[in-house]
Amino acid sequence: MTNATVQESSYYIKKASLLAEGFAKDAAERDKAGGTAKAQKDAIRNSGLLKVLIPIKYGGEGQSWSVVLRIVRELAKTDAALAHLYGYHFLHLTTPHFCGSHEQKKYYYTESAAHNWFWGNSFNPIEPTLQGKTEGDTVILNGRNTFSTGSQDSDRLLILWEENGQPYVGIVPTKRSGITINDDWDGMGQRQTDSGSVTFKNVIIHAEEIINLTDSERTAFSTFDAIISQIVLANVFVGSAEGALEEARRYTREKSRPWYLSDYEQAVEDPFIQRLYGDFWVDIQAAVTLVERAGEKLDEAWAKDKAVSAEERGEVVLATGAANVFGTKVALHVTSSMFEVMGARSATRKNNFDRFWRNVRTHSLHNPIEYKRKNIGRWVLTGEYPTPTDYS
């Protein structure tokens, strides 16, 4: 990476840092309230960061996945929900690129850059309850999808449905007639990701809105959705751990009291507290190294586009899987153990420090790390790369 490239990427990361500072002012209160972070999503829209990954020739900023992921981690330090929405915006936006035709890639990149679209989804491969019926050149959708992340206040929805047992993927305007975004997300964490359900009643899907797999089917590149999803979440988790550490450090320095049986005047002098902070910091540095290495591997593979090989995909999966596994473990440990270094007075609803743990715990359950460990372990023993699925 050249010095000019580094300076350019730093510009976008600095923008994200300034956004995060603003989001931090009411992050704890918004987490309690839940609902849609409309003002904050509009701030992201106005920042220009929704176009960072779009190639310059299509009207975007032409940055790499590494820059996007660094922004995700920056936002996650103060608001894991917004970080998740931002990262998944690019997962949905790039689907026509790695999975569709050249014409669809060009169209959706160009239109998204021109209109500053914020993408959401109604896409649940585990529970495909949405059904389609072909009528001439259109498909009529009826049913309901759950876990529709970012659906509220989005401009486009990436959707999944079945017809005669066959899965299909398409893209529709969120406000199309017959689409109802339900306000029923009730997660204990990630409370402002709008991950509730979407109902479809006689929704018309036009032929050009259905992802055309002709150019990409049977290529390793067409299976990059799971890779992108997991490295985005890994950065959400690691960013959450970084944010939790900073909140805890500030609280310990300013408010924590030394244990009454100790001989210390300030909590920061306690060697047991110092050791825990040392452990937190070391673990987080290791997790940051893994997610950044995985981001670089993704950059290399992405640059090869449809020419990327199955073996090269496998190497990216190992890197992103390792980052996700270790990042999850570190984030869960730091966000639950932070109370040990802050003290009993920190564990109040007013402080709402538990939001860091709730956010990580909620989303890490959607793709258990035990299966990633198994896949990596099988590769270690047999040299067999993980089989491409919606989650690996």
Image: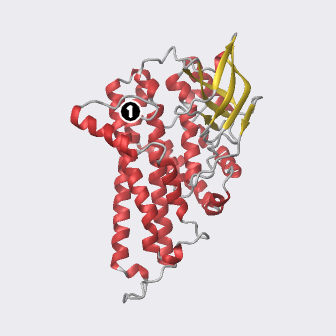
* Scheme of colours in the image: secondary structure
Residue 292, given in percent of the width and then of the height, sits at 39, 46
Q: Nearer the viewer, residue 184 or 214?
A: 184
Residue 355 against residue 110 in the figure, above or below: below
Q: Classify residue 355 by image quadrant.
A: bottom right
For the N terminus, give its image quadrant: top left
Indicate the secondary structure of the residue bearing disc 1: helix
Tell me if 361 is positioned left or right of 37 in this view: left
Q: Nearer the viewer, residue 244 or 339?
A: 339
Q: Classify residue 274 by image quadrant.
A: bottom left
Residue 140, given in percent of the width and then of the height, sits at 70, 20
Residue 42, given in percent of the width and then of the height, sits at 69, 47
For the C terminus, give its image quadrant: top left
> Who's the residue at 54% across and 28% down the image?
95
The crowd level at tag 1 (other Cα within 10 Å; few <14, some 14-19, many 20+) is some
Q: Classify residue 260 by image quadrant.
A: bottom left
Residue at the limit of the structure toward the right, as seen here: 177
Tell me if 312 is positioned left or right of 51 in this view: left
User: To which residue does mark 1 refer?
Assistant: 300
Q: Nearer the viewer, residue 152 or 251?
A: 152
Q: Is residue 383 visible?
A: yes
Residue 326, given in percent of the width and then of the height, sits at 36, 50
In the image, what residue type sits under mark 1?
Glu
> Who's the residue at 49% across and 56% down the image?
240
Residue 52 against residue 10 in the figure, above or below: above
Residue 274 against residue 372 in the figure, above or below: below
Q: Nearer the viewer, residue 240 or 137?
A: 137
Tell me if 74 is positioned left or right of 152 in this view: left
Q: Is residue 10 visible?
A: no
